[in-house]
Amino acid sequence: MEKTYLMIKPDGVQRGLVGKIVQRFEEKGFQLIASKLLHMSREQAEYHYAEHKGKPFFGELVDFITSGPVFAMVWQGDNIIALSRAMMGKTNPMDAAPGTIRGDYAVHVGNNIIHGSDSVESAEREIANFFSPQELITYEIPLQK
Ligand code: CMP
């Protein structure tokens, strides 16, 4: 079973979209195994976005992601990395299809509502940046009667 790190960015939290976004992943059939509202430090943000260091938008990206609380989550499910990225839509909301999270709720690439891991390796690194192993709660889901 695959795990991923999903994070509702400050724009999504401020616009009151946490519930709607969580609902989409629950309804898809994925399992929430950890979550918290947190205001990340610059160090945590620079580590999270290390692959973008040196890009022209890096400073702006770190400023934005540390500008307010984010809703950090770990989700689990079969093929969740690829499927959750499909549900989020393209990084640039201008290219994101209607029906996806960014396609429905965002306009600008810098304020694109949600982040999701792009590989198993990124997911492991990103989860460890925000959660201790003890915070991941796995549980059985009984079959619906
Ligand atoms: P995210 O999936 O969180 O990963 C990197 C982020 O950089 C991306 O979403 C965008 O929000 C942000 N970003 C800001 N400006 C740009 C840009 N010009 N091109 C790509 N990503 C950008």
Image (cartoon, rainbow, N blue to C red):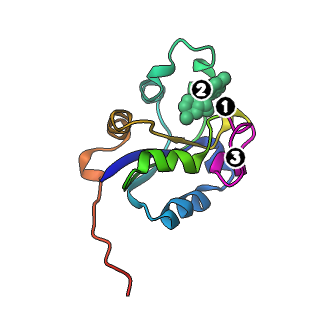
Image quarter for residue 5?
Answer: top left
* Neighbours of disc 3 within 10 Å: few (<14), some (14-19), many (20+): some
Tag 2 and tag 1, C-beta contact below 8 Å: yes
At numbered mark 1, what does the secondary structure look like: helix, strand or loop? helix
> Looking at the image, which is closer to me, 77 or 42?
77
At numbered mark 2, what does the secondary structure look like: helix, strand or loop? helix
Q: Is residue 132 left or right of residue 24?
A: left
> Badge 3 is on which residue?
97
Q: Quadrant of ligand 1?
A: top right
> Badge 1 is on which residue?
110
Gap between marks 2 and 1, in whole Å? Answer: 7 Å
Gap between marks 1 and 3, in whole Å? Answer: 17 Å
- First in sequence: mark 1 vs mark 3: 3
- First in sequence: mark 3 vs mark 2: 2
Q: Is residue 81 left or right of residue 20?
A: left
Question: For the residue with label 2, is its CB less than 8 Å from the closest atom of ligand 1?
Answer: yes
- First in sequence: mark 2 vs mark 1: 2
* Neighbours of disc 2 within 10 Å: few (<14), some (14-19), many (20+): some
Task: Using the image, tell me which numbered label, if any, was put on residue 26.
Answer: none
Q: Is residue 37 left or right of residue 34?
A: right
Residue 134, position as x, y percentages in the image: 24, 51
The magenta region covers: 92-107
Kind of residue sitting beneath label 3? Ala
Seen in the picture, residue 7 relative to 66 is either above or below; the reply is below
Q: In this view, which residue lies farthest toward the top?
A: 54
Residue 12, position as x, y percentages in the image: 63, 48
Gap between marks 3 and 2, in whole Å? Answer: 23 Å
Task: Using the image, tell me which numbered label, if any, was put on residue 61.
Answer: 2
Question: For the residue with label 1, is its CB less than 8 Å from the closest atom of ligand 1?
Answer: yes
